[in-house]
Amino acid sequence: MDWLNIYGLLILVVIMIPNIIYAIKCKDGFQNKFENKTLELFEQISRFGSFGFMVINVLYFGFWFDNALSVYLTVNGFLVSLYCIIWFACGKSESLFKALALSIIPSAIFIFSGIMLLHIPLIIFSILFAVCHITISYKNSIL
């Protein structure tokens, strides 16, 4: 896979489609009721770190078992499909299920991808992203 992970890029493009559609349809955007500037800062840093390292291979060791690429594509394909289905099925509803599902699934995609590729920076950024993103989504959902 050299330095560019084209599969990671495709995964990011697909999971961004519902987000872009939401941003176009809902001009007012998302109301952040849980205001924790430190957590929000770490979420943004880890989000862009995860995005970047999904595409750019730096300090990674590559797939570590036979047929790992097939497992990587199958599991990520399932998770991306599930993410898109939940986005469109839940629509504009604001529920705890939607908030958690739409934060846990991308976190799982990033963590799983990091583990499958033994990609150290992706693992670190994705774990930080998961903690921050899931916490913020949960808090916003219950407030």
Image: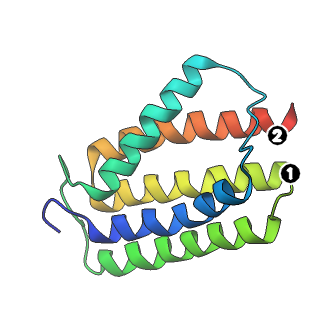
The picture quadrant where one finds residue 54 is: bottom left
Say whether marks 1 and 2 touch (CB < 8 Å): yes
Disc 1 marks which amino acid? Ser
In this picture, residue 20 sits left or right of residue 5:
right
For the residues marked 1 and 2, what is the alpha-carbon distance in whole angstroms?
A: 7 Å
The numbered mark, 1 or 2, whose residue comes first in the sequence reads 1
Q: Is residue 65 left or right of residue 106?
A: left
Please tell me which residue is depicted at 44% across the width and 59% down the height of the picture. 112
As rendered, which of 29 and 43 lies closer to the eye? Answer: 29
Residue position for label 2: 141
Q: Nearer the viewer, residue 73 or 50?
A: 50
**Mark 2 falls on what kind of element?**
helix
- Residue 115 in picture, x, y percent from top left: 36, 55
Which residue is rendered at x = 71% and y = 44% of the image? 29
> Residue 91 in the image: x percent, y percent?
80, 64
Q: Is the residue marked by circle 1 packed among few (<14), some (14-19), or many (20+) residues within 10 Å?
A: few
Quadrant in the picture for the C terminus = top right
Residue 110 spot, x, y in % from top left: 44, 54
Name the image colouring: rainbow
User: Hey, which residue is sitting farthest left in the picture?
Assistant: 2
The circle drawn on residue 95 is 1
State the mark number for residue 109.
none
Q: Position of residue 6 (x, y in %)?
A: 28, 70
**Is the residue 70 above or below the residue 8 in the image?**
below
Amino acid of disc 2: Ser
